[in-house]
Image (cartoon, grey):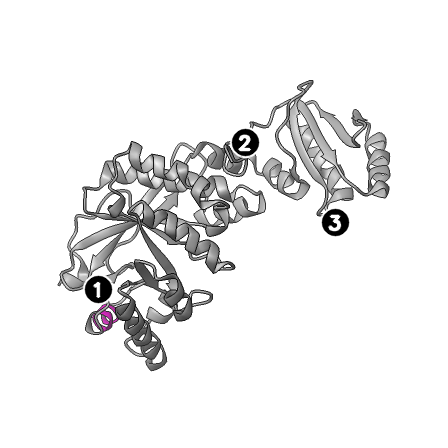
Amino acid sequence: MNSCTRCGHIPNLPDKGQLLVRMKEEHKMMKLITRLQHEQFTYIVNENDIFYIEYAGKEELLQLIEQLDAELLSSEEVQATYSAYGEAHFARFIPYLQLRERIMQWPLVKVINEGLFTQHIQPVIKLQTNDVYGYEFLVRSTPPHLSFNPGSLFSFSQKAGLQSILDSQARISSIEISAKLLENGMKRFINFLPSSIYDPAHCLKSTLKAVERHQVRPEDLVFEVVETEKIHDVNHLKKIFTVYQSEGIHVALDDLGAGFATVEVLKELKPNFAKIDRAIIDYCDQNETNQAKIKEIVSVADAYGITLLAEGIERKEEAEFCLDINIPLAQGYYFGRPQKNPVTNVYPYAN
């Protein structure tokens, strides 16, 4: 595999061009022909049953999408793409529903395609000393580019089939910004989507090249499975972890104790770090059920040599409980919110 269309940049959407549509169902083809003729769109159907439908501007393209929706929204087998008017070459075919998402929210496609975002960093604290151990990197919009909600951007990327591009761009952005902001020895926690990495040995090449290009020490990096990702294939995740760890990079399991990230998964994956989910950290000083869960996690982590981090700490009492049961690291609004630059203020817990 020399290249991958899943995480490469996609061509710009031309102002004047043609939409290409292909489908297997003959009755849908006939219905589409009838609709295109009725709405007076210019089109041809080639010998491979591919529709070439012309549009003269963005407004006409949106009108075309409205007509296609009436016939194609219910079918998952319809493929589509686009090209400039009269251009023989075109972008690869993708599911029509993905292309529709891209066309309807093209400014977000531009943000993802060109990496028009920045990273804010949230401190990770050593509970014993209140020193900064590292930072988690989080995608944020940046003026003068389009403002967006990070969660909505990632949700859009999944619907539009752009999650691999966004995931790769975000990793590389984090590495680049970390090289400018942080000194050697400061850990950088960077999220990744396992489902966006189809072939770990190939898909992670751009990430590893960025590490080398920006002269970031591999041992300062911690790549963690993001909170929204369900662990469908533990063996695939193991392969990703192996590629990272073979380069001297650390790996982390996120959301431990909630959903798919169970103690059994922790034992099987044996990551360098594990983040305890805030759902069981919240008011852990008062909740005996969650205390038992956390203590079990601490016991397993100790046995496997895994460093634990308590996520989402917002109260002094939560921090004190985690310190008392020997959780070494913590993160949350109690210590610091995500911000542009490394922290300089004194932490509440230090007082």
Q: Residue at x 29, y 35 (%)?
A: 212
Q: Nearer the viewer, residue 345 or 77?
A: 77
Q: Mark 3: give few (<14), some (14-19) or many (20+) Cα within 10 Å.
A: few
Please state which of the two labelled residues, at mark 2 or mark 3, is closer to the viewer: 2
Q: Which residues are magenta?
A: 317-322
- In the rendered image, residue 211, in percent from the top left (x then y), is placed at 31, 38
When the figure is inspected, residue 338 is found, relative to residue 300, above or below; the finding is above
When the figure is inspected, residue 63 is found, relative to residue 72, above or below; the finding is above
- The type of residue carrying mark 3 is Ser
Query: Counting residues from the N terminus, which is met first, the one under dot 2 or under dot 1?
Result: 2
Q: Quadrant of the C terminus?
A: bottom left
- The type of residue carrying mark 1 is Pro
Residue designated by label 1 = 328
Q: What whole-number distance in Å separates the C-alpha atoms at marks 2 and 1?
A: 43 Å
Residue designated by label 3 = 74
Specify whether 321 is left or right of 8: left
Residue designated by label 2 = 10
Q: Which mark is residue 238?
A: none
